Amino acid sequence: MKKLDPRIERIKERLKERQPPGRYQHTLGVVKAACNLAKYYGVSEEKAEIAALLHDYAKDLTEQELKNYIRIHNLEVDSSLLETYQLLHGIVGAHMAKKEFQIEDEEVLQAIRYHTTGRVYMKPLEKIIYLSDFIEENRDYPGVHTLRELAYKDLDCGLLQGFNNTIQFLLKTDKVLHCNTVEARNQILRELQFKENKQITNDNPQ
């Protein structure tokens, strides 16, 4: 029997102390969704669990606390993130995960860091954490059932729909749209279109 990473229980205990009940329930929902997707797509479930547990570790810090942490630890942050401070918890959370729980795995750290914006050429674990944040069982919004189904039909198709949902919401609410999200959406769209055109060519050889 595989021995579980001992840090997992320590992280859970810290989360219970740190997060309000609603946030903790959301986190557990993301863990469940991420582990299910990881198993389905052949990604490490242990990495998925750790990344999911810590994805919102810095979420409840205030704007000033986030910006102070970034300044003190000299973290590299672009102006759009500073303008939209709600996105900063990914960057701060990844740094805190490394510092407080000795998380050194770059896949895990990147999944935490980019779960708020996405980025081009995301690794499978990053895609899983990004999507799990939207589809976990406590989420209830128009389109969530469709997104859940897409996530299991094709991870990239689910990711594209997740980006589209985010972009549409930000446009409707007149909020700043981070360039990482736009670039990630365009890149995954091009990849899907390329695969579709290749399949059409293979199905209809000249």
Image (cartoon, rainbow, N blue to C red):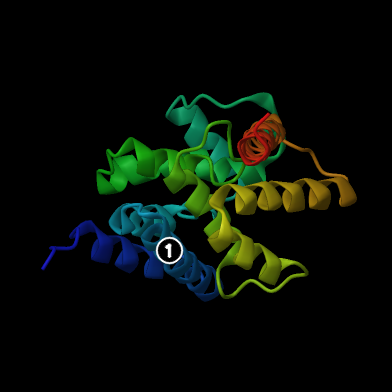
Q: Position of residue 166 (x, y in %)?
A: 73, 50
91 to 100, vertically: above or below: above
Asked whether the viewer can see residue 123, the reply is yes
Q: Residue furthest front?
A: 206
Q: Name the residue carrying label 1.
A: 18
Tell me if 96 is positioned left or right of 91 in this view. left
Q: Position of residue 79 (x, y in %)?
A: 68, 25
Q: Position of residue 26 (x, y in %)?
A: 53, 69
Q: Can you say which quadrant of the picture contains the N terminus?
A: bottom left
Dividing the picture into quarters, in which one does residue 142 lie?
A: bottom right
Query: Which is nearer the eye, 123 or 139?
Result: 123
| Residue ID at (68%, 29%) | 206
| Residue ID at (45%, 29%) | 72
Query: Which is nearer the eye, 42 or 109?
Result: 42
- Rate crowding at label 1 as few (under 14), some (14 to 19) or many (20 or more) other CA atoms within 10 Å: some
| Residue ID at (35%, 54%) | 42
| Residue ID at (62%, 34%) | 198
Label total for image = 1
User: Which SS class for mark 1?
Assistant: helix
Q: Position of residue 9 (x, y in %)?
A: 25, 66
Query: Which is nearer the eye, 205 or 184?
Result: 205
Query: Which is nearer the eye, 27 or 48?
Result: 48
146 to 51, vertically: above or below: below
Dividing the picture into quarters, in which one does residue 200 lie?
A: top right
Asked whether the viewer can see residue 112, the reply is no
205 to 39, vertically: above or below: above
Tell me if 143 is positioned left or right of 35 in this view. right
Q: What residue type is disc 1 on?
A: Arg
Tell me if 102 is positioned left or right of 74 in this view. left
